[in-house]
Image (tube, rainbow, N blue to C red):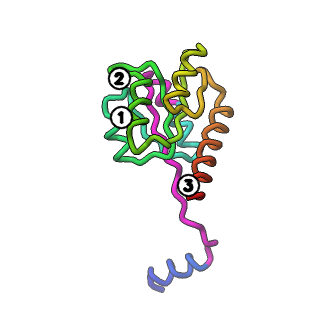
Amino acid sequence: MSHLNIFSMMSQLMPACEATTKPRIMFVEDDDSGRQLLQEWLELMGYEVFSLPDGRDFMLTLEKISPDLLLLDLKLPHIDGFTLLEQLQTSAWRSLPVIVLSAYNLQRTRDKAAELGCTHYLVKPTPLDTLQGIIQSALDDRELSESDC
């Protein structure tokens, strides 16, 4: 029996699966260990994650990977998270869902982030089940708004 016939038989026996793409998350966090741990956890949860240690290549990376969601720390070297949010608001990416993960818990910080387009603001450390729920909710909301077009 040829290899082609075996693969043909196997494909007939296997259940048909829809081709799905993993949601893409861009994650900007300067703490190396925190970034690596959260990236690994997000990948285990089924997301495709692209991470940056700072905002220097932020817009270039956005254009390259076309993420479905942004996880963003505010206190970053070189370019802070507020500046990155401002850049988003003046770009084609202004409707990208943004979840801020920050150690800052001041109301004025939350308000400023919201004014700049942040859709969710979480204070570190955030329980992983909470983060996962908010990520999924933001992705679901984005999918609904895109299907309304």
Circle 1: is it few (<14), some (14-19), or many (20+) Cα within 10 Å? Answer: some
Mark 1 lies on residue = 58
Q: Earlier in the sequence, mark 1 or mark 3?
A: 1
Q: Classify residue 89 by image quadrant.
A: top left
Mark 2 lies on residue = 79
Residue located 59% across and 51% down the image: 145
Label 1 is placed on what type of residue?
A: Phe
Q: Position of residue 84 (x, y in %)?
A: 40, 29
Residue located 50% across and 43% down the image: 95
Mark 3 lies on residue = 146
**Extreme residue in the bottom direction:** 1
Asked if residue 32 shows in the view, the reply is no
Mark 2 and mark 3: span between their CA atoms? 30 Å
| Total numbered circles | 3
Highlighted range, magenta: 13-37
Label 3 is placed on what type of residue?
A: Glu
